[in-house]
Image (tube, rainbow, N blue to C red):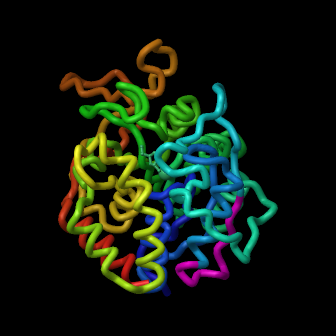
Amino acid sequence: MSKGPTFLYDCDTGIDDAITLLYLASLVRAGEAELVGVGTVHGNIDPLTGALNTLRVLEAAGMTEGVPVAVGAPRPMAQDVHYALDWHGTDGLGDTHLPDPAGRPVAESAPAQIVRLAREMPGELTLLATGPLTNLGAALLLDGELPSLVREVVVMGGAFDHPGNITTHAEANIWHDPEAADLVFAADWPVVLVPLDATHPTAVHDDWLDRLGAHDGEVAQFAARILKFYEVAYTPTLKRRGAVIHDALAAMLAVDPGLGEYVHRPVRVELRGELTRGTTVWDARSLPAEDVRRPVKVAVGSDVAAFQERLLTAVVSL
Ligand code: BDR
Ligand code: CA
């Protein structure tokens, strides 16, 4: 029997999503987690391309069977769709234009897959979400009992005491579908939120990237190749060569919560602000909060050195 979380991964693959898939594949190979399915959503790229990218990454990692990849929502609930091609390339994998994968996405939609697997494995699933939250929001609308069926929801998204990365205030995953994100934070289930406050300090730079590039294994070379585009995209923000592999921190904190520092606060998403739509807002008052929402466990920091070392070891181990 496997130890560790049973993951259903919802993502918008995406360069850092792809590195996260490699990390998850290494955990599965080591018997430290299970991956029972992946769903894709609009965000970095359209969800069909994201699903094909997911299959490419899983196949590169040698995971060719047993992980259904479902295509999910092609657009947000209440606004137009936007992709992040400047950050992830026109193909979502840094303009590497890799060949088609051997496998195909399953017919079931990603929200339906969430509901089905949660019903088949009540209390077992860790829903790891590193794209816009449209699929999770739709799944909540499909099945009102979903919150009681899921073990934990771990989300990369939001920004609190940190500037936004898509508007001055908002982080991309939340901004891409603020209504869906607010549904997820309003539901009565245990949510761990990993915002930019925690992910930005984990940026990897020359040493980490060069160590990855120095490995001649096929998976390490694949990771180094897709990260090249991301490094260039990140250079103006970081003011030197580097990359923030946001999504992998959420996965790692799901496996080892002890690597993070947290505060517990109700979280809402600003839905109407002219300048602030898509911004995550927490209630930080010391007075007893009037907010009746279940507090979210928000990561505000992590053991950066341990994160970087474990991620590198995982990717080169494949
Ligand atoms: C998030 O936005 C996406 O571009 C990344 O994949 C990550 O999930 C960071 O804000
Ligand atoms: Ca992502």
Q: Is residue 292 visible?
A: no
Q: Looking at the rendering, in which quadrant would you find the C terminus? A: bottom left
Left or right of 198 on screen, residue 90: right
Which range of residues does the magenta coloring cover?
60-70
Task: Name the quadrant containing residue 99.
Answer: bottom right
The reply to whether the magenta stretch includes residue 66 is: yes
Q: Residue at x 51, y 57 (%)?
A: 94
Left or right of 48 on screen, residue 217: left
Task: Name the quadrant containing residue 95.
Answer: bottom right
From the viewer's perspective, is residue 224 above or below residue 131?
A: below
From the viewer's perspective, is residue 314 above or below residue 295?
A: below
Residue 170 pos. (x, y %):
40, 30
Q: Residue at x 61, y 48 (%)?
A: 45
Left or right of 200 on screen, residue 12: right
Q: Is residue 146 visible?
A: yes
Which of 142/45 is in front? 45
Prevailing secondary structure of the magenta residues: loop
Extreme residue in the right direction: 107
Q: Residue at x 68, y 65 (%)?
A: 69
Q: Residue at x 59, y 50 (%)?
A: 90
Task: Name the quadrant containing residue 204.
Answer: bottom left
Which of 237/278 is in front? 237
Residue 203 pos. (x, y %):
26, 54
Which of 31/44 is in front? 44
The reply to whether the magenta stretch includes residue 7 is: no
From the viewer's perspective, is residue 237 above or below residue 306?
A: above
